[in-house]
Image (cartoon, rainbow, N blue to C red):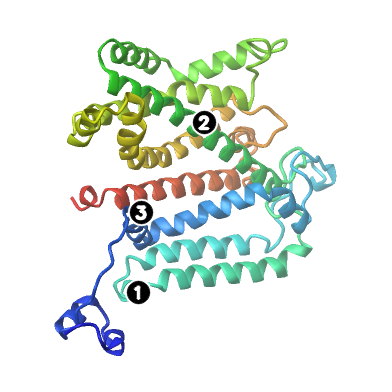
Amino acid sequence: MSVGAPERLLEAESAAEAEAQGIVVDIPARSPLDLFWRRFRADTVAMISLGVIVLLVLAAIFAPLIIKVVGAPGPNVQNSNALDQFGTPTGPSKNALWPFIVGLMGVVLAMLATALPWLRARRRSPMVIGAGALLLAIILAAALWPSAKHLFGVDPLGRDVFARVLYGARVSLLVAFVATGLSMLIGVTMGLTAGYYRRWVDTVISRVIDVLLAFPILLLALGLAAACSLGHGCFGGLIKPGLVVVIFVITFVNWTYIGRIVRGQVLSLREKEFVEAARALGASNRRIIFKEVLPNLVAPIIVYATLIIPQNILFEAALSFLGAGVQPPTASWGAMLANATSSFDTAWWFMVFPGVALLVTVLAFNLVGDGLQDALHPKAASY
């Protein structure tokens, strides 16, 4: 029976049921992007993590506006009146943490809902739980924050921890995205060149990668920070302690990993039939590389980029913790954790909040990376 009665098709709950009723259903072809999005959207944990990342990025972009709305001082404003009579920093304002607690619990419950059999049958349950928690957190924030002075308390210098955590997100995300982008650009270029041209080109690039992988990256960063901290820095002031050193060190080493991955993929792709056909039709090497080989590397490049972003965030925090990264008074999660080690017993909030922010950010990027890997390689994920 042909599709002549649309009402019968609407009554059918699925294509299988429609087929059982004798209704011929023309299923439109789906593009690879559409198939990828359908698989990724089905991963509730990855979608929730993506939402967390979006909120983090928006919070970092609109940090000055958020601080103004909640009435917090700037990240570098020192207020001795925020310390008690003994010079000890004061903790979070009363009840000011409830919006964050409710929001975090909503995310956790939404993730757990995917594992509960009585909720898993309802596909929109995690979304409803997350949206309800977000709405309740907004209501609590509107009711509790106007009277709060310091949402996360202050540090030993009287600076607002909430403002510094927000501005620390700016630093971490900036370093992660810029360093990852530069690493990808260099690594993909070198990997394509080495894998496609082979012979002496592959030998030279591969040996350079081996040498760079032997560099102790932490010692390299500490050495650069120490050597370039005097005078006008190194290379005519091009490299100075701070964000530039962090981005330079991460890019200097991280491009080698993606370069090796791309090289191995290109060595396999260059022997495929579609590359041989393009070569037989007279296509130039440049056209084959950018039109035939590179589009087939998009999936592993995207997956690897999402997986090294959290590594770069942790690396920036580690360098700042050791004093070789972002320099004071710029807010950084790693530097805040380093400063909190001497006062953790009396000012726990100074370490907990940047630590939680770092944990949530890294976990969200890792979960999104796993979801992208499963969506782009569904056959590999099924094993």
Q: Earlier in the sequence, mark 2 or mark 1?
A: 1
Q: Which residue is mark 3?
A: 33
Contact between labelled residues 1 and 3, with CB atoms less than 8 Å apart: no
Image coordinates of residue 56 in percent, x first then y, are 57, 51
Q: Nearer the viewer, residue 153 or 89?
A: 153
SS state under label 1: helix
Q: Which residue is mark 2?
A: 179
Q: Residues within 10 Å of mark 3 (few under 14, many from 20)?
A: few
Q: Amino acid at mark 3?
A: Leu
Q: Amino acid at mark 1?
A: Leu
Image coordinates of residue 162 in percent, x first then y, are 68, 49
Q: Which residue is mark 1?
A: 119
Q: Amino acid at mark 2?
A: Ala
142 up-or-down from 93: above or below:
below
Spatial CA distance of label 2 from label 3 is 27 Å
Spatial CA distance of label 2 from label 1 is 40 Å
Q: Earlier in the sequence, mark 3 or mark 1?
A: 3
Q: Residue furthest right?
A: 81
Contact between labelled residues 1 and 2, with CB atoms less than 8 Å apart: no
Spatial CA distance of label 3 from label 1 is 29 Å
Quarter location, residue 147 = bottom right
How many circles with numbers are drawn on the protein? Answer: 3
SS state under label 2: helix
Compared across the picture, whether 164 is left or right of 21 comes to: right
Q: Earlier in the sequence, mark 2 or mark 3?
A: 3
244 up-or-down from 141: above or below:
above
Q: Nearer the viewer, mark 2 or mark 3?
A: 3
